[in-house]
Each structure stands twice: as structure tokens, then as C-alpha cells.
């Protein structure tokens, strides 16, 4: 079995010059139908974030993805707007929730297709790590929020998938798992914005897998393998064996652990 090593890269928050928005849109569009099969983490984190969201009149779901949370978000709002950069994701979400009255918009978090002060709250789970500049996304969120509006979001931080990163060192010296923002860097971006920070806490989330291939298939299913620079070359049986052996020290009674450092944030646009 021969497979491309770059087919199993994950691209987290990278320096601005490594983010390719067209590639991100394409990757997540291609994964629309398969996304749910590999989205255990997204479902868990998204549900936890829902508990931090109040009922509001107009709610923006920023990075709506395949629309898994659309129904729950619809119940928390009188008017729901779903925005995503990936056209196929929007179509999938719309078809999935065809019985609900939702406004679907193709858009970039750094250039939202909304007018000033037009929404009362923003919900965004595990999307902001893909933006070009987080500071720009915060400026746009602040612009479209009404006074007193809240922005609740989750994003991934440094240390995410450290097990996979360490396991790759048994194969080669290439960087297969990029680094995310540190908590300190995230705090600084928020401090430099116009938002008031109400809460920021980091909650590690662990997903267990039977094998390394099962983990990488999940990453591929959600489109996270095609969103940043990739190393080149092919990985054959020997490479896969080395990768699997390198991951074995992280095996527990539940399986191989994959750790995600998740930041839960609540910001408010102060009046």
C-alpha cells in the first residue's frame, strides 16, 4: 500500500503567509459529505459551546460547516444566519436543514457579508484556527455585532495533536503537524481587539483511536489534511510501520490518544 504522506497532514493556525484560503475552501467543500463521520471532536466541543450561548434575536453561525448544529442554534434564535467559506458545505447544510428558516451566506470570517451591528450574537466552533489573521476576524465580528452582543467561540491551541507530531519524528524530520497559537498569543490578540473578554479557559479534549490510520482518516474526512503547507513525498509500508510504532507509547486502555487543546472564549461588544 502506497499513500502520499501529505494526504495525512493537518494544517492548524499557521503564519499568515502559509494560509491558502482557496485551498481551505476547496478542502472543506470536498469533505462536506464525509465530515460527520470524522467529527467526534467537533460535535463534543460544539455541544459544550452551545451551553454558553444565550437565546437571542439574530444569531450568526460563523463556520457553519455541514450544519450539524443548525437545529440547536435555530432553537436559540429568532433569525439564524449560517456563513461558511466552503460552497459545498453551505449546500450540504442547507439541504440537511431544509425544513428550517435559515439565511445561508458564502463568506470569509475576515470579510463578512453582513452590515454593521446586524446580529446579536455569534457562535463559532473550531473554525477560527483556519483564518489568515485572527485579529481581522475579531474586527469583523465586532463590526457586525450589535452593542452588548456576545461572540462565543472555540479554537485550537499549541500542543494539539502532540502525540501525532512526536510519532512523525520516527519517520522523518519534516513538519507534518503545524503549531497552533499559544494561549498567551490568543490572549494578546483578544486584548488588542475592541472586545471585552468575559471568559477564556482551555479544556483539553482527548479522542481515542484503534490505530494511527483511523486518526488520519478522521482528519482527512473533515478536510483538515489539506489546509496548510504539506511536505512532499510518498510514505510506503515501512513509513507507516514507523509511524504506528512511534504512536504506541500513547496507547491506553481506551486506545491511542489524540489530544486537542481547545480554548473556549466569550467576548462581548461593550456599549
Image (tube, helix red, strand yellow):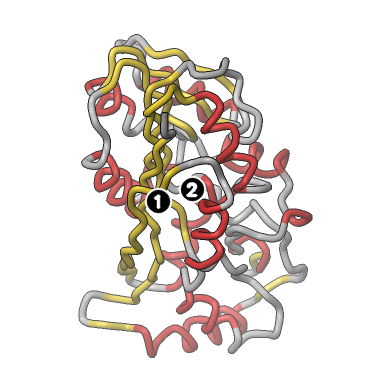
The residue carrying mark 1 is 38
Q: Position of residue 116 (x, y in %)?
A: 56, 18
- Between 179 and 40, the one lying in front of the other is 179
Residue drawn at 48 percent across, 73 percent down: 159
Which quadrant holds the N terminus? bottom right
Residue drawn at 51 percent across, 51 percent down: 190
- In this rendering, is residue 130 above or below 148? below
Secondary structure state at the residue bearing disc 1: helix
Q: Position of residue 122 (x, y in %)?
A: 41, 31
Q: Which mark is residue 75?
A: none
Q: Position of residue 165 (x, y in %)?
A: 54, 77
Q: Position of residue 90 (x, y in %)?
A: 51, 24
Q: Residues within 10 Å of mark 1 (few under 14, many from 20)?
A: many
Q: Quadrant of residue 21?
A: top right
Residue drawn at 39 percent across, 71 percent down: 258
Give the distance between the C-alpha atoms of the residues marked 2 and 1, in whole angstroms. Answer: 6 Å
Instruction: Compare marks 2 and 1 and give the one earlier in the sequence.
Output: 1
Relative to residue 9, is residue 207 drawn left or right?
left
Numbered-mark total: 2
Q: Residues within 10 Å of mark 2 (few under 14, many from 20)?
A: many
- Between 255 and 119, the one lying in front of the other is 119
The answer to whether marks 2 and 1 mark residues whose Cβ atoms lie closer than 8 Å is: yes
Q: Which mark is residue 222?
A: 2
Secondary structure state at the residue bearing disc 2: loop
- In this rendering, is residue 114 above or below 183? above
Amino acid at each position: 500500500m502506497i499513500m502520499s504522506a501529505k494526504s495525512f497532514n493537518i494544517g492548524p493556525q499557521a503564519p499568515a503567509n502559509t494560509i491558502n484560503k482557496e485551498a481551505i475552501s476547496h478542502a472543506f467543500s470536498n469533505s462536506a459529505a464525509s465530515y460527520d463521520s470524522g467529527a467526534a471532536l467537533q460535535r463534543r466541543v460544539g455541544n459544550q459551546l452551545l451551553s454558553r450561548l444565550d437565546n437571542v434575536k439574530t444569531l450568526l453561525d460563523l463556520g457553519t460547516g455541514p450544519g450539524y448544529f443548525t437545529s440547536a442554534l435555530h432553537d436559540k434564535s429568532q433569525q439564524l444566519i449560517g456563513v461558511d467559506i466552503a460552497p459545498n458545505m453551505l449546500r450540504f447544510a442547507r439541504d440537511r436543514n431544509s425544513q428550517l428558516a435559515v439565511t445561508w451566506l458564502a463568506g470569509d470570517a475576515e470579510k463578512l457579508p453582513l452590515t454593521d451591528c446586524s446580529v446579536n450574537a455569534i457562535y463559532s466552533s473550531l473554525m477560527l484556527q483556519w483564518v489568515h489573521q485572527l485579529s481581522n476576524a475579531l474586527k469583523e465580528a465586532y463590526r457586525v455585532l450589535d452593542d452588548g452582543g456576545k461572540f462565543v467561540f472555540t479554537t485550537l491551541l499549541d500542543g494539539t495533536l502532540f502525540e501525532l507530531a512526536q510519532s512523525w519524528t520516527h519517520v522523518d524530520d519534516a513538519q507534518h503537524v503545524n503549531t497552533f497559537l499559544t494561549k498567551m498569543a490568543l490572549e494578546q490578540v483578544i486584548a488588542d481587539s475592541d472586545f471585552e473578554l468575559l471568559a477564556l479557559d482551555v479544556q483539553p479534549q482527548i479522542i481515542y483511536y484503534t490505530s494511527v490510520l483511523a486518526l488520519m482518516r478522521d482528519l482527512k474526512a473533515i478536510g483538515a489534511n489539506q489546509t496548510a503547507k504539506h511536505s512532499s513525498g510518498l510514505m510506503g509500508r515501512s513509513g507507516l510501520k514507523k509511524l504506528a510504532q512511534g504512536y504506541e507509547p500513547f496507547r491506553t486502555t481506551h486506545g491511542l490518544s489524540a489530544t486537542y487543546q481547545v480554548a473556549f472564549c466569550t467576548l462581548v461588544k461593550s456599549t
